[in-house]
């Protein structure tokens, strides 16, 4: 046998095959960018397509859009009996590989094999050929790359009867039928249908004349089948022979003799302009078949056409091959296989040669398809058509065209819209009407006629909400609309991704409209928005439109969808247009028009039935469905077959019933049930796979016949889809095309019918979940029990479902659908195992979609399973880590390990986090706020400091104000930002909910704005002190239902009614004559109190007034009378806090911090409750029951319980907090200086949610941290010092927040345990340099000492004194440099002896005069050779000293003058080889600092390193080879690597997310960089950079800034964690990282100390004495 493509069928049949096809491949590459205009489906890189795309993006909805589906869809054509082995092998072995290949490239792979697995019963309606041709056309239209493959071999194929024949043609043929039997037979099977224009004869269903054809009896059915084949063959011959007589050589006769295969090949290859790009022929030639004996004929006839057929099938086959296919296809698209015949035909199971042939076919098919698929995808990539924006716009344009195509009438609706479009109005038009009233079609027509009415250059932006995933979601909708606006107006600027920024961007983009190019924006079905971002509350909708902009929206009027009532509250009545029901005359006109378009008519009785039904339900949707049903009626239909239901739901159910009756109840109910149950619909591949693992369906389908592979035959779904083609649409979802219902009414009807009860819904969703989990993919065999009770198992060949296809193509379908279906199918454990407790899932979804999508999943699960601890804890971990995960999803595993204290509860997730696949820094143990405690969630928002806070009376909403002039509305339960109001005004200083929480008020300089709480839209602007006022506007909210505002103005207190927006009462008060704008005011009901801390002598006065009185009078209280100091000076202490209850006024201040309580009526002092001197009483917030007062107290919340008259400090924060708000004293919201809003429940006090202390004390007597340690101040890490020659251990310097207590602790970075601890009292702190493993050098007073920090002893005191605060080690740590006693020079001292060696004098030998040393530094901490110094009276001149020669190398003079220029002397350094000296510098009029670079050999200034974005220098660090790392702040926050030799920028590291960094630490080999911010509360991420690739390796975000150091040769990052009093070691992990193994055995000198050692640094008896032999005393005497 000749196996493999050995011959290529050419004109002579024996030309050699070019398997490599190199020349042809090169030819294809040359042609790949040339494509016919009429078929831009495969390659789109042409000017025509570019122009087409541009026109579509500008809003031309009438252009036919080039297809944009990311699909490879191949139709396989073959004859039925002879290619079974080939098709089954490809199905099993190749198609799954091609699916994976396409998935990895972001494409879907579909094969349409209409022969595979089809039983005879599917041919009852004779639709097979039509469906095949329709599918070929769909493949040609949609596929990127190959779209048609034929396996034509030695069989011509089945020839079927035409289903319809033109009446004139049929009657001509009948006139040439000579046999009376033939005429009678044709008359019985072909009926004339005069409803079709022109009339046709229709072949009747087989079961019409042979009802036994659908019998349940195999025997009866078999007899009917044989009868039909006999009848059909007679019919075909009668027709064929008569047609030959009538048409002779006319091509019209071909339809009666062509096989289905030839029809397919004509459509797929012959009639195609360029089939060489996307068509293949895999041609099998059976050798020596002509020599077979007659006894083999029956088997042979299954594979080979006999040459003696009276219809000349063999001749037709040869003609098809040689005259059609070979002529159209290039050689490299034809692969030929010579296969020897055997007595069993093609038998790969038993014949090795045939097995080899099948293997070769599979290999060739896979290679060729991958080659062409790659080319097709490449062609798309080079085209604008790959832009997701085009994909979105094209879908809406196509949907619009479909709606307009069948639109008729409705002039009563279109005319007002036309008037609106032509008017000069700049307001919104709202279309509203009940479901099915035709709103969507009206919007489509409005879009179509917009350009004609306004301008041919108008930009039309159209979205049918809910028809695509991007139009269901407010963020994605605004993103696509803003992008389209930008592209349409030729300004392709960046579009933000965050919802809050998009809401700001939309009004700005609308302003692009001009008179020449006006804009029409149409948004249909606002009610179709999903829940994200509270889109239906319409806070994003611009109410004020710029000039030349029209906005048309539509919605259902139902209150449950929220939109319509909100629009009514915002807009005037004339802005609404109701879509009425259809008039009878309109219905009849529309029906007649539709019939004409369809080339159909109805009998009079049928027309009357249709019109009467529409009169009972005059809705366009009902009209459309009923019309589609009527189009199925033939003129010979019986009256009972021409009946209609009278409601939309009933007519839909009737449609479903008919489809079920035709195709089987089980198959239809499950197929449509799956489509309905899909979260965003299902792709056809997904649906076919899901049906193939549903054994109920397969047992029903396989009732009488079982195919070789247990899968659903593809044709079955194709037929159902064709039956419902008008009501099922293809929409985009997750980057693919999904099938879904085109109208809400269909989905609701399908839910009612196919998902009727909980049991059914669970089953359907469970099957879908199984598919997306890949439960039966990748060769896993699914067990089954057939309908006959036979057990078995089989591979269903369903698509694999990894989280990621290949390297970076995410499985968005799985990520989107799986959580939903697991929840709906009540598979809680599976939901946790595969989603919520699965690290890779969480990480992948964050990367592929967003953290918000992950939160949405948790939110849905928490609502369904509110008592599940695992889901709650993981959700809280993510909520607490939100800030870090928004910066970098790679922090997921580290944040889990840093927060989960009790690992038993989340053991599986913690175990996964300890071995992540992605690169990250893992901490040694938890040290961040754990889940389960009082802190529920942490929310990021404002760009600048949060200043104001309030919550609604029900606790569901919160509002915050930022120093960036923004105000944000929050959902407290979820932490979601509902609305962001930007640029509200300058100095937003007060905000409150008011008017029963329906509104909130925001004050700023000059005005108060009132906003709706439901959507954030502004409803009023109040200027209490006049329009011209620019003063801040304090206010309080009061009245019966918070409907009054009380506002201090110039000399007067005003009461403003919010409903009328007018001042209803005012009272004069000279207290308000001065600085009234700085008053603090509170109100309860109508009682108002206010004070002013800026009024000097009056700052201790409280003004009280009852505004309910007819003539209100102001009364004054003096809670804190003036007091006289012992020196006779009077002191006035201000009021700092105030609240009002129903019967009391309570004040406090920051001196006493107690509560003074006054009677609200008499103003008598009722009592004083003593407070704590350590409190900071300000910004009191009173609970609704008036029992608790909360206020920010440094880093905690202080709570007063007015019932028990006690106070407590709770809820420890990492940073000081600015404000608190609570409705009940338990659920508390806080804002802090770290720009975070925290949401707490103080009642939650799970012991497992407490971080264990790991400090020195805990190792001796373990104790758990608790918020109850009210007054205790913990020790804070102040610095971490590396130990020379010891990479394992580190020395930590810590101190109390206040006081002189310090400590030095040696830590083991491998175990993170303390080894020894020495406590020290030092008022000035410790500035030590580590000398060796147990010694440090430090300055104590004026003495330089060597301290043994392990034994706690002073081992050496250096001779003489120093006038500086520190000493630096040089020359391999054998010498030190320090300031001389007088402070004017430097001295070099010997470490071993403690004696001075040399003086480095700044003055001349003669004068010896100089000013004090301002600063000095060395080039290296270990092996310094150079020292720089600068003097206080000349801060522009550096002195550079050579340590070895003890001499001055040079002086470096900075340009400029001292009064206008400056150097930041502590930001200075030498280059690695000391050739260059660098310093942070600012000259004259420069706004920002840069780096001045001098050459130390020449003493010349060589470069000024300036940032191109005018960033100021933050810190500088030298690298090897004369490089310098500079971190920047202000306008730039990146890190730049400079070449010092030429002053050129080598590389830019992007820097950090929020603020600049001020710490840069390099490893000794310069391969890694650690960057972090040491003090800013807003920037808390530290990052490791690879300095070879200049890329970020990993980062981690802490909750509070701390000291950080590198250890273990840079393999370990050590963080001082104040929360637990311990160091935490971080190491890199991930699949791409060589894991660093911590050393296990400690062979160092350190031994674990039993107790803390107390060190006395100061020796009062000796430290003050002068040493008589101090060599520097005569140089620096005070007399000099």
Image: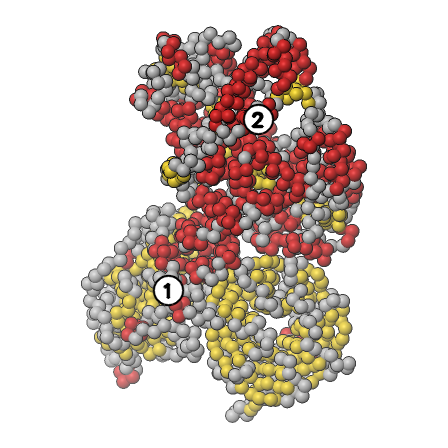
Quarter of the C terminus within the rendering? bottom left
Q: Residue at x 60, y 55 (%)?
A: 534
Residue 796: x and y in percent read: 41, 36
Q: Is residue 1007 above or below residue 469?
A: below
Residue 901 bears which disc, if any? 1
Q: Residue at x 75, y 44 (%)?
A: 581
Question: How far, Cα to Cα, is label 1 from label 2?
Answer: 72 Å
Q: Which residue is mark 2?
A: 211
Quarter of the N terminus within the rendering? top left
Label 1: how many residues lie within 10 Å, few (<14), some (14-19) or many (20+)?
many
Label 2: how many residues lie within 10 Å, few (<14), some (14-19) or many (20+)?
few
Q: Is residue 857 left or right of residue 554?
A: left
Q: Residue at x 69, y 28 (%)?
A: 638
Q: Residue at x 76, y 33 (%)?
A: 608
Kindly indicate the quadrant of the structure image that contains residue 610.
Answer: top right
Q: Is residue 393 left or right of residue 1442?
A: right
Q: Are marks 1 and 2 in contact (CB under 8 Å)?
A: no
Mark 2, secondary structure of its residue: helix
């Amino acid at each position: 046998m000749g196996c493999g493509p050995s011959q290529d069928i050419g004109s002579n049949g024996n030309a050699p095959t070019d398997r490599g096809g190199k020349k042809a491949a090169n030819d294809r590459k040359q042609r790949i960018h040339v494509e016919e205009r009429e078929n831009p489906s495969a390659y789109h890189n042409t000017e025509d397509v570019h122009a087409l795309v541009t026109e579509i993006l500008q809003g031309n909805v009438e252009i036919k859009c080039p297809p944009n589906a990311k699909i490879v869809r191949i139709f396989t054509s073959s004859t039925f009996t002879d290619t079974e082995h080939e098709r089954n092998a490809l199905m099993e072995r190749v198609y799954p590989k091609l699916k994976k290949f396409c998935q990895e490239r972001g494409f879907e792979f579909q094969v349409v094999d209409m022969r595979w697995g089809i039983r005879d019963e599917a041919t009852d309606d004779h639709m097979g050929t039509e469906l095949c041709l329709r599918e070929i056309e769909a493949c040609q239209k949609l596929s990127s790359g190959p779209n048609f493959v034929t396996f034509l071999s030695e069989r011509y194929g089945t020839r079927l009867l035409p289903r319809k024949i033109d009446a004139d043609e049929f009657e001509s043929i009948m006139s040439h039928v000579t046999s009376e039997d033939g005429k009678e037979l044709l008359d019985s099977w072909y009926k004339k249908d005069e409803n079709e224009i022109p009339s046709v004869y229709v072949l009747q269903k087989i079961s019409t004349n042979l009802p036994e054809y659908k019998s349940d009896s195999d025997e009866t059915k078999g007899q009917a089948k044989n009868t039909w084949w006999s009848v059909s063959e007679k019919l075909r011959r009668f027709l064929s022979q008569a047609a030959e007589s009538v048409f002779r050589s006319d091509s019209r006769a071909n339809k009666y003799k062509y096989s289905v295969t030839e029809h397919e090949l004509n459509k797929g290859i012959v009639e195609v302009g360029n089939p060489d790009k996307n068509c293949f022929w895999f041609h099998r030639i059976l050798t020596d078949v002509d020599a077979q004996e007659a006894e083999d004929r029956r088997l042979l006839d299954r594979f080979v056409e006999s040459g003696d057929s009276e219809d000349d099938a063999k001749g037709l086959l040869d003609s098809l091959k040689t005259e059609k296919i070979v002529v159209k296809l290039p050689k490299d698209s034809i692969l030929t296989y010579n296969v020897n015949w055997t007595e069993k035909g093609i038998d790969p199971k038993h014949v090795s040669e045939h097995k080899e042939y099948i293997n070769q076919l599979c290999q060739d098919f896979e290679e060729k398809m991958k080659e062409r698929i790659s080319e097709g995808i490449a062609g798309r990539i080079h085209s604008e058509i790959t832009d997701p924006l085009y994909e979105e716009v094209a879908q809406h344009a196509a949907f619009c065209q479909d709606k307009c195509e069948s639109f008729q009438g409705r002039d009563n609706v279109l005319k007002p819209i036309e008037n609106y479009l032509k008017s000069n109005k700049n307001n919104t038009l709202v279309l509203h009407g009940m479901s099915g009233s035709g709103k969507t079609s009206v919007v489509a027509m409005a879009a179509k006629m917009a350009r004609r009415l306004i301008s041919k250059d108008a930009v039309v932006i159209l979205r049918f909400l809910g028809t695509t995933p991007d139009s269901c979601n407010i963020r994605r909708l605004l993103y696509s609309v803003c992008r389209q606006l930008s592209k349409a107006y030729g300004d392709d600027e960046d579009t933000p991704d965050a919802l809050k920024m998009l809401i700001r961007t939309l009004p700005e983009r609308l302003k692009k409209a001009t008179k020449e190019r006006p804009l029409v924006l149409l948004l249909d079905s606002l009610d179709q928005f999903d829940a994200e971002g509270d889109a239906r509350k319409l806070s994003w909708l611009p109410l004020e439109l710029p000039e030349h902009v029209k906005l048309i929206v539509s919605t259902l009027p139902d209150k449950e969808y929220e939109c319509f009532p909100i629009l009514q509250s915002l807009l005037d009545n004339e802005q609404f247009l109701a879509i009425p029901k259809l008039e009878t005359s309109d219905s009849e006109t529309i029906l007649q028009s539709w019939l004409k378009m369809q080339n159909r008519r109805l009998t009079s009785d049928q027309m009357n039935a249709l019109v009467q039904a529409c009169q009972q339900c005059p809705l366009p949707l009902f009209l459309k469905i009923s019309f589609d049903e009527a189009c199925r009626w033939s003129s010979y239909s019986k009256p009972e077959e021409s009946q209609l239901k009278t409601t939309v739901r009933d007519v839909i159910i009737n449609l479903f019933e008919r489809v079920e009756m035709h195709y089987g109840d089980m198959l239809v109910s499950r197929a449509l049930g799956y489509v309905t149950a899909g979260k965003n619909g299902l792709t056809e591949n997904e649906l076919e796979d899901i049906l193939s693992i549903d054994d109920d369906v397969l047992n029903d389908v396989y009732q009488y016949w079982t195919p070789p592979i247990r899968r659903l035959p593809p044709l079955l779904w194709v037929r159902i889809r064709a039956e419902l083609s008008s009501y099922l649409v293809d929409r985009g979802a997750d980057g693919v095309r999904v099938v879904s219902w085109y109208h809400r009414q269909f989905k609701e009807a399908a839910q009612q019918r196919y998902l009727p009860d909980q049991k059914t819904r669970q089953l359907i969703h469970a099957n879908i979940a199984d598919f997306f989990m890949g439960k039966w993919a990748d060769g896993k065999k699914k067990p089954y029990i057939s309908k006959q009770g036979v057990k078995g198992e089989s591979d269903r060949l369903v698509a694999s479902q990894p989280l990621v296809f290949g390297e970076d193509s995410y499985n968005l379908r799985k990520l989107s659908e799986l959580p939903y279906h697991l929840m709906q199918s009540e598979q809680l454990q599976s939901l946790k195992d595969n989603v919520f407790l699965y690290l890779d899932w969480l990480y992948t979804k964050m990367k592929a979609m967003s953290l918000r999508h992950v939160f949405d999943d948790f939110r849905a699960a928490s609502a369904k399973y509110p008592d599940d601890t695992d889901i709650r804890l993981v959700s809280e971990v993510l909520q607490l880590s939100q800030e870090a995960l928004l910066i970098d999803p790679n922090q997921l595993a580290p944040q889990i390990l840093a927060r989960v204290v009790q690992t038993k509860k989340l053991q599986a997730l913690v175990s996964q986090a300890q071995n992540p696949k992605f690169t990250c820094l893992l901490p040694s143990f938890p040290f961040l706020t754990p889940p389960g405690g009082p802190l529920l969630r942490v929310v990021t928002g404002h760009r600048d400091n949060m200043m104001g806070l309030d919550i609604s009376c029900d606790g569901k909403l919160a509002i915050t104000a930022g120093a960036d002039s923004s105000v944000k509305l929050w959902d407290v339960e979820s932490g979601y930002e509902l609305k962001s109001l930007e640029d509200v005004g300058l100095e937003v200083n007060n905000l409150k909910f008011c008017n029963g929480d329906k509104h909130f008020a925001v004050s700023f300089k000059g005005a108060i704005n009132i906003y709706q709480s439901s959507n954030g839209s502004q409803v009023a602007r109040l200027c209490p002190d006049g329009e011209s006022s620019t003063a801040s506007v304090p206010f309080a909210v009061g009245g019966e239902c918070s409907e009054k505002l009380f506002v201090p103005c110039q000399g007067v207190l005003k009461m403003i009614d919010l409903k009328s927006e007018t001042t209803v009462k005012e009272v004069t008060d000279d207290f308000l004559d001065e600085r009234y704008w700085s008053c603090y005011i509170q109100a309860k009901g109508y009682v108002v109190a206010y004070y002013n801390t800026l009024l000097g002598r009056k700052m201790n006065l409280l003004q009280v007034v009852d505004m309910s009185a007819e003539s209100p009078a102001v009364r004054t209280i003096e809670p804190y009378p003036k007091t006289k100091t012992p020196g006779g000076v009077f002191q006035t202490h201000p009021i700092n806090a105030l609240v009002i209850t129903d019967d009391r006024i309570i004040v406090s201040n920051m001196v006493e911090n107690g509560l003074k309580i006054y009677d609200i009526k008499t103003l008598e002092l009722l009592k004083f409750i003593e407070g704590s001197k350590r409190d900071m009483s300000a910004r009191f917030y009173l609970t609704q029951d008036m029992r608790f007062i909360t206020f920010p107290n440094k880093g905690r919340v202080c709570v007063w319980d007015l019932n028990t008259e006690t106070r407590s400090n709770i809820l420890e924060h990492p940073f000081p907090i600015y404000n608190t708000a609570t409705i009940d004293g338990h659920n508390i919201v806080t804002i802090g200086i770290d720009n975070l809003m925290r949401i707490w429940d103080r009642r939650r006090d799970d012991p497992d949610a407490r971080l264990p202390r790991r400090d020195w004390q805990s190792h001796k007597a373990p104790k758990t941290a608790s918020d109850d340690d009210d007054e205790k101040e913990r020790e804070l890490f102040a610095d971490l010092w590396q130990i020379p020659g010891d990479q394992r251990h580190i020395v930590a310097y810590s101190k109390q927040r206040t006081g002189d207590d310090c400590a030095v602790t040696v830590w083991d970075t491998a175990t993170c345990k303390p080894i020894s601890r020495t406590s020290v009292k030092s008022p000035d702190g410790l500035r030590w340099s580590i000398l060796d493993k147990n010694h440090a050098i430090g300055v104590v007073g004026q003495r330089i000492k060597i301290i043994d920090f392990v034994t706690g002893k002073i081992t050496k005191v250096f001779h003489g004194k120093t006038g500086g605060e520190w000493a630096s080690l040089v020359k391999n740590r054998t010498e030190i440099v320090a300031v001389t006693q007088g402070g004017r020079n430097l001295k070099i001292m010997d470490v071993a002896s403690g004696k001075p060696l040399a003086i480095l004098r700044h003055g001349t030998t003669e004068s010896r005069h100089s000013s004090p040393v301002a600063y000095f530094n060395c080039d290296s901490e270990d092996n310094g050779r150079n020292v720089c110094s600068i003097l206080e009276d000349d801060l522009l001149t550096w002195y550079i000293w050579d340590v070895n020669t003890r001499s001055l190398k040079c002086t470096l003079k900075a340009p400029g003058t001292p009064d206008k220029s400056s150097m930041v002397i502590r930001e200075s350094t030498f280059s690695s080889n000391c050739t260059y000296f660098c310093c942070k510098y600012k000259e004259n009029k420069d706004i920002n600092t840069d780096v001045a670079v001098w050459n130390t050999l020449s003493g010349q200034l060589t470069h000024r390193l300036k940032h191109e974005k005018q960033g100021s220098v933050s810190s500088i660090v030298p690298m090897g080879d004369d490089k310098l790392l500079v971190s920047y702040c202000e306008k730039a926050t990146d890190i730049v690597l400079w070449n010092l030799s030429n002053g050129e920028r080598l590389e830019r590291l992007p820097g950090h997310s929020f603020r600049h960094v001020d710490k840069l630490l390099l490893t000794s080999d310069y391969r890694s960089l650690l960057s972090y911010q040491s003090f800013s509360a807003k920037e808390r991420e530290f990052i490791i950079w690879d300095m070879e690739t200049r890329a970020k390796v990993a980062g981690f975000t802490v909750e509070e800034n701390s000291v950080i150091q590198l250890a273990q040769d840079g393999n370990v990052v050590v963080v001082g964690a104040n929360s637990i009093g311990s160091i935490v070691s971080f190491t890199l992990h991930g699949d791409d990282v060589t894991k660093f193994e911590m050393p296990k055995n400690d062979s160092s000198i350190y031994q674990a100390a039993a107790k803390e050692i107390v060190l006395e640094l100061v020796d009062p008896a000796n430290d003050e004495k002068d040493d008589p032999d101090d060599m520097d005393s005569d140089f620096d005497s005070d007399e000099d």
